[in-house]
Image (cartoon, rainbow, N blue to C red):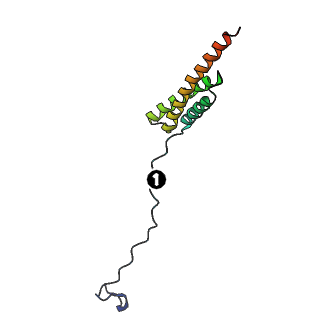
């Protein structure tokens, strides 16, 4: 196939077409986000609130127990791979255990003090 003289380059070959333009590809998606962290957050919040109100005889103890349960379930879901927020669940568990221990101390102290009143 021959081309008119103005379409041939110096080597006598037809000019090459520029490569086709492809728009840049979007960056790859990161790791998929885990399922909600609701139980981990709830366990941490109830553990912290229980720790703050541990001096109220029944309230701190109740919030501490609820925090232990929620944080424990949150940790088990993270371990199974069906949730995230392990750090929050561990923090909630620690705070909730402290709230239970201190809540028991205050509850027992109030009961002992109330029975010793003459």
Up-down: is 37 above or below 50?
below
Q: Residue reaching furthest bottom? A: 5
Which quadrant of the structure image shows residue 60? top right
Residue drawn at 33 percent across, 87 percent down: 9
Up-down: is 14 above or below 84?
below
SS of the residue under disc 1: loop
Up-down: is 57 above or below 26?
above
Query: Can residue 83 be seen?
Result: no
Question: Which quarter of the image is occupied by the N terminus?
Answer: bottom left
Up-down: is 107 above or below 13?
above
Question: Which quarter of the image is occupied by the C terminus?
Answer: top right
Label total for image? 1
Residue drawn at 47 percent across, 35 percent down: 78
Q: Residue reaching furthest left? A: 11
Q: Residue reaching furthest right? A: 118
Which quadrant of the structure image shows residue 49? top right
Q: Position of residue 73 (x, y in %)?
A: 51, 29
Observer-nearest of 113 and 101? 113
Q: Residue reaching furthest front? A: 118
Query: Can residue 7 be seen?
Result: yes
Q: Position of residue 104 (x, y in %)?
A: 58, 20
Q: Position of residue 61 (x, y in %)?
A: 60, 23
Query: Disc 1 marks which residue?
Result: 29
Residue drawn at 35 percent across, 91 percent down: 5
Q: Position of residue 29 (x, y in %)?
A: 46, 53
Q: In this image, 3 relative to 57: left or right?
A: left
């Amino acid at each position: 196939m021959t081309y008119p003289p103005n379409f041939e380059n110096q080597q006598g070959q037809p000019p090459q077409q520029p490569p086709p333009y492809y728009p840049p590809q979007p960056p790859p998606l990161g790791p998929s986000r885990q399922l909600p962290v609701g139980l981990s957050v709830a366990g941490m919040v109830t553990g912290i609130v229980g720790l703050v109100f541990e001096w109220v005889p029944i309230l701190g103890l109740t919030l501490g127990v609820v925090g232990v349960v929620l944080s424990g379930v949150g940790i088990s879901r993270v371990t199974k791979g069906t949730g995230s927020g392990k750090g929050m669940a561990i923090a909630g568990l620690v705070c909730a255990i402290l709230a239970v221990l201190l809540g028991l101390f205050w509850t027992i102290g109030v009961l002992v003090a109330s029975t010793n009143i003459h």
